[in-house]
Image (cartoon, coloured by chain):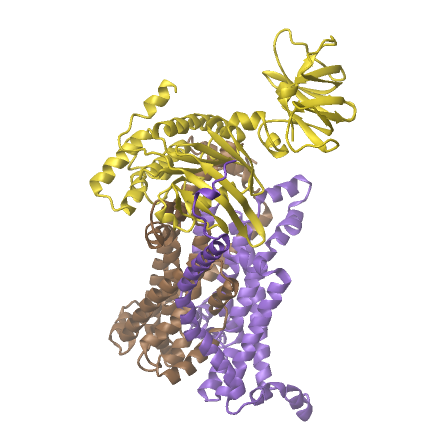
Chain colours: A purple, B brown, C yellow
């Protein structure tokens, strides 16, 4: 082989290596410069305000944990007044919120799974067509959809009218401002968030695996339970995570469709802030955020970030 | 097998297609019929409420009544003539346009950095940028509220647009990043090899190819801002009353079908946007097939 | 050149330029602790057609990427005509490149694709039109300006990629697996076209492939790469007949390997002792000492089956064994022979009238010329 080193003026090799390393770092700095505007903006109008607000839970009106005390008094309330007294009202709100989010998650899964399954079993062209029916509500304002349920569920609403007209009911039933209305509206709004990741994962399942299972003697039910269902679990995880976390933070729908007793955390926070209990409002916000974070970590630890979000993004 | 597809009469051009399709279609069993009944019910549940609003908006009755006793356009007139509605619409449009421009520019640049760059902390920054998607809206809203109360930005449309930009950025970042992941980096290499500097490469090659993703992100950004209520409740004050805020106020006071008229307008807008997004998606698919052809040939050559 | 080739490449005017000399000087590229390219030095003459040949992960593409400017080396320098370029951004290098899968811009027509490098060089519209037309004539696609890449066949896309890489008269042309996506017949045809183009234009071509046959057919010189290093660099015949390492012997063509120990060196030849086979001889090679374990390599087609007759020439190595397997491969038969000591030997015999055939289990005596084998 030819050696050419001596022909050309030699910069000391070490100095040149340092120069190349600087060039490569410069290359990465270009990317950082591209990122910087968005990052600074997000810190200024999201990161900093949220962090500053959360610190108020410790600093308002004075430094300390006093804002968390109302949340820790549940036990003493029970002890002091006996079992006939309802639990601490704040703890109750957390309980209601968790319960609503959980029930909504279960029902969106039960309703969404068959839809995603059916759509994933037809040709992509037909599935896209049917998917429009899922996307139309998805793209419609939450406020408008909540209003639509008010129209449907009201005393003079379509459902009551229809039930009276068909003779099922003699007089209108209270549907609006009930827990049932909250469930109906929230499931309606969150269902697309379940169907979309489920569908994405199911589309990615290799149909040949199902044929292979059938060929190996599995009955259709066994093919579904032993092959399809386990393979679709990442989609189930992603959908449930998304719906549950979004459900925890709901405000508009329960406020419009729920009754006096259907208070969720977001509504409580809003109420506290408007009553100028800023420290306590911030404390409630911190607890809500920690709950969402805990659920997120639980899911991603159990299943791996890639499995939960890699699939949802597909 | 033939019994399950009685409709597959031999149309000459479709014969080959139907033959392969017939083989892949599962047999029509009772469980499949039940499945599709469930699917139909669920899809009806999803779509029905959205379309029930339109007839109400054309009702002549003063209160919610169904079916409407007569037809009229009075609620649309109300929307146009009653104080507040039209200005709120314009505020919403203005805020949404500023949000879209800001979020799309910042988000596209950030996506390029996050997908192409190899600097430390990339994953953490990515998680931070996407987190507004899952952090409950009320938390962002009161954070912004306290901040704006100090910064004297309450009631300022620009302030509202900034807050909305923070909420909309994740949508732009996820959409543009997804398109960039599907992008063949060799195209950028080729452009630079042919003499285009970084900006020219972006303008002439990268942007035209990722444009569908950028448009999709921009659409999401627009809708996010246009529909946003919770932040607006806290910081719109009296100077930046948006349409959702106005609707909320009116829902809490008197429910008359004016809001149905507004809703119908919004739904029409959503459907129009959805359809244009679908068209965009199809277009991007067509561009992607160009690379598929090459890949298929590669596969063919290996077999 | 056949007549057809000359018809395809009508004589060009302005397209084409004198090739540049390219020098890799002790180039190294690390990714963290992984060494992708390890101390590569290579001097490429103006107008040479050189191929970097190696399996995937051997560092050949990384080497090419550093020359094109998409990667900055960790150490070393690259010179084009005496100018150091390792730190020059890719868009100022003026090096043409045909990418794997072509990287034609899908949103531009063929004409726009080809005009792109000329626009970047701020050429006038008239000049762009003229040069685009000329280069399309050169690759045999006149009048294709208005088509989109997706409307072209694989072979046509390949030609457009070549045209786009040549239109700005680069003095060096890089080709990264440019024929990898095509079927065998088209590939062989385009190999000849590219070779003809090279001869006509005089541009220096650096070609990357994992296909050894392609490398042998096209190149003036081949650099065989493995694990980031150049194992051997030389003319195709040199590499085939005189592989210097076991890797080169296996990667290019088929080879037999016989374990042996150096017995003595007698000036012109090396005598080795192979267990069970006795003494074998090979051409002299420096750096060997008696008692060193070595490997003897010989190509299957250099081995001949012979009868029992004595009187073998002195410059032959002879061994006997048993036929273990016979495969009919059309123009020849491939025999696997088991030798004493359980070593195996593959040989290929032409299917010709009068050539004796063997069956499984037959005893067989084979020989090869001493000059046809190598110590590696």
- The picture quadrant where one finds residue A140 is bottom left
> Vertical placement of C103 versus A310: above or below?
above
- The picture quadrant where one finds residue B239 is bottom left
Residue C73 as seen in the image, left or right of residue C288: left
- Does residue B63 appear anywhere in the picture? no
x 51%, y 76%: residue = A178
> Vertical placement of C47 versus A286: above or below?
above
Quarter of the image with the C terminus of chain C is: top right
* Label total for image: 0
Quarter of the image with the N terminus of chain C is: top left
x 46%, y 45%: residue = C65
Furthest residue to the front?
A: C267
Residue B85 as seen in the image, left or right of residue B111: left
Furthest residue to the top?
A: C354
Residue A50 at what x, y percent from top left? 47, 77
- Does residue C253 appear anywhere in the picture? yes
- The picture quadrant where one finds residue C178 is top left
> Vertical placement of B154 versus A116: above or below?
below
Residue A111 at what x, y percent from top left? 55, 60
x 46%, y 61%: residue = B46
Residue B42 at what x, y percent from top left? 51, 59
Viewer-proximal residue among B116 and A188: B116
Viewer-proximal residue among B84 and C91: C91
Residue C256 at what x, y percent from top left? 66, 26
């Amino acid at each position: 082989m030819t050696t050419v080193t001596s022909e050309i003026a030699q910069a000391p090799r070490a100095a040149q290596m340092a120069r190349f390393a600087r060039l490569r770092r410069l290359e990465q700095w270009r990317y950082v410069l591209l990122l910087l505007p968005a990052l600074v903006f997000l810190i200024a109008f999201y990161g900093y305000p949220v962090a500053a607000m959360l610190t108020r839970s410790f600093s308002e009106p004075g430094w300390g944990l006093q804002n968390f005390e109302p949340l820790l008094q549940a036990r003493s309330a029970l002890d002091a007044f006996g079992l006939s007294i309802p639990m601490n009202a704040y703890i109750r709100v957390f309980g209601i919120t968790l319960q609503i989010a959980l029930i909504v998650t279960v029902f969106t899964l039960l309703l969404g799974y068959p839809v995603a399954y059916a759509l994933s079993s037809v040709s992509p062209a037909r599935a896209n067509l049917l998917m429009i029916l899922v996307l139309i509500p998805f793209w419609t304002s939450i406020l408008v959809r909540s209003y639509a349920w008010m129209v449907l569920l009201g005393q003079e609403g379509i459902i009551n009218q229809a039930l009276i007209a068909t003779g099922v009911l003699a007089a209108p039933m209270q549907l609006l401002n009930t827990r049932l209305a909250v469930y109906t509206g929230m499931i309606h709004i969150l269902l697309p968030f379940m169907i979309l990741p489920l569908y994405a994962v199911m589309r990615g399942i290799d149909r040949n695996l199902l044929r292979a299972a059938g060929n190996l003697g599995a009955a259709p039910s066994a093919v579904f339970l032993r092959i399809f269902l386990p393979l679709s679990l990442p989609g189930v995880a992603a959908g449930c995570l998304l719906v549950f976390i979004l459900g925890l933070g709901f405000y508009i729908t329960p406020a419009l469709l729920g009754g006096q007793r259907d208070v969720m955390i977001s509504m409580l926070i809003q109420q506290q802030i408007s009553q100028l209990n800023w420290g306590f409002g911030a404390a409630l916000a911190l607890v809500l955020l920690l709950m969402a974070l805990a659920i997120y970590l639980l899911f991603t630890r159990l299943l791996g970030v890639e499995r939960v979000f890699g699939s949802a993004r597909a | 097998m033939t019994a399950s597809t009685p409709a597959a009469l031999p149309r000459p051009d479709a014969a080959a297609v139907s033959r392969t399709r017939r083989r892949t279609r599962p047999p029509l069993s009772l469980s499949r019929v039940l499945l599709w009944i469930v699917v139909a019910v669920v899809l009806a549940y999803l779509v029905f409420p959205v379309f029930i609003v339109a007839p109400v908006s054309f009702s002549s009755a003063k209160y919610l009544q169904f079916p409407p006793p007569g037809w009229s356009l009075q609620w649309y007139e109300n929307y146009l003539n009653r104080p507040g509605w039209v200005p709120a619409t314009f505020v919403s449009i203005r805020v949404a346009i500023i949000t879209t421009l800001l979020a799309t520019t910042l988000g596209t640049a950030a996506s390029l950095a996050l997908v192409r760059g190899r600097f430390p902390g990339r994953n953490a920054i990515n998680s931070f940028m996407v987190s507004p998607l899952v952090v409950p809206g009320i938390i962002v809203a009161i954070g912004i509220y306290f901040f704006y109360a100090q910064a004297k930005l309450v009631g300022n449309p620009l302030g509202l647009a900034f807050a909305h930009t923070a909420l909309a950025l994740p949508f732009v970042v996820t959409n543009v990043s997804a398109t960039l992941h599907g992008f063949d980096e060799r195209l950028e290499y080729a452009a630079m090899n042919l003499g285009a500097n970084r900006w020219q490469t972006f303008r002439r090659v990268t942007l035209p190819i990722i444009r569908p993703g950028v448009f999709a992100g921009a659409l999401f950004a627009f809708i996010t801002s246009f529909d946003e209520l919770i932040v607006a409740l806290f910081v719109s004050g009296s100077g930046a009353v948006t349409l959702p805020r106005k609707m909320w106020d009116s829902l809490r006071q008197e429910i008359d079908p004016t809001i149905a008229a507004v809703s119908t307008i919004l739904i029409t807008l959503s459907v129009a946007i959805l359809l244009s997004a679908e068209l965009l998606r199809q277009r991007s698919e067509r561009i992607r097939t160009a690379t598929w052809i090459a890949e298929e040939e590669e596969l063919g050559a290996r077999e | 050149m056949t007549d057809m080739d000359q018809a395809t490449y009508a004589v060009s005017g302005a397209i084409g330029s004198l090739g540049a000399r390219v020098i890799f000087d002790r180039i190294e590229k690390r990714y963290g602790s992984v060494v992708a390219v390890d101390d590569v030095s290579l001097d490429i003459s103006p107008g040479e057609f050189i191929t970097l040949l190696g399996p995937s992960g051997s560092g050949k593409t990384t080497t090419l990427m550093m020359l094109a400017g998409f990667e900055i080396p960790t150490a070393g320098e690259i010179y084009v005509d005496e100018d150091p370029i390792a730190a020059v951004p890719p868009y100022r290098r003026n090096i043409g490149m045909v990418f794997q899968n072509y990287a034609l811009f899908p949103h531009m027509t063929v004409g726009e694709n080809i005009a792109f490098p000329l626009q970047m060089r701020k050429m006038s519209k008239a000049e762009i039109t003229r040069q685009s037309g000329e280069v399309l004539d050169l690759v045999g696609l006149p009048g294709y300006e208005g088509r989109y890449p997706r409307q072209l066949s694989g072979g046509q896309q390949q030609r457009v990629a070549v045209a786009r890489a040549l239109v700005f008269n680069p003095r060096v042309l890089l080709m990264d697996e440019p024929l990898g996506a095509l079927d065998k017949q088209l590939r062989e045809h385009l190999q000849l076209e590219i070779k003809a183009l090279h001869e006509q234009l005089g541009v220096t071509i650096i070609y990357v492939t994992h296909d050894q046959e392609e490398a042998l057919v096209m190149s003036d010189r081949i650099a065989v790469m493995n694990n980031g290093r150049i194992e051997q660099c030389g003319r195709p015949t040199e590499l085939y007949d005189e592989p210097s390492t076991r890797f080169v012997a296996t990667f290019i063509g088929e080879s037999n390997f016989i374990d042996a120990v150096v017995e003595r060196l007698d000036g012109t030849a090396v005598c080795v002792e192979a267990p069970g086979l006795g003494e074998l001889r090979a051409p002299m090679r420096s750096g060997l000492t008696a008692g060193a374990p070595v490997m003897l390599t010989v190509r299957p087609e250099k081995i001949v089956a012979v009868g029992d007759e004595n009187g073998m020439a002195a410059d032959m190595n002879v061994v006997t064994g048993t036929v273990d397997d016979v495969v009919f491969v059309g123009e020849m038969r491939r025999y696997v022979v088991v030798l004493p000591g359980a070593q195996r030997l593959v040989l290929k015999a032409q299917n010709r009238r009068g050539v004796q055939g063997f069956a499984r289990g037959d005893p067989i005596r084979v020989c090869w010329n001493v000059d046809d084998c190598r110590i590696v």
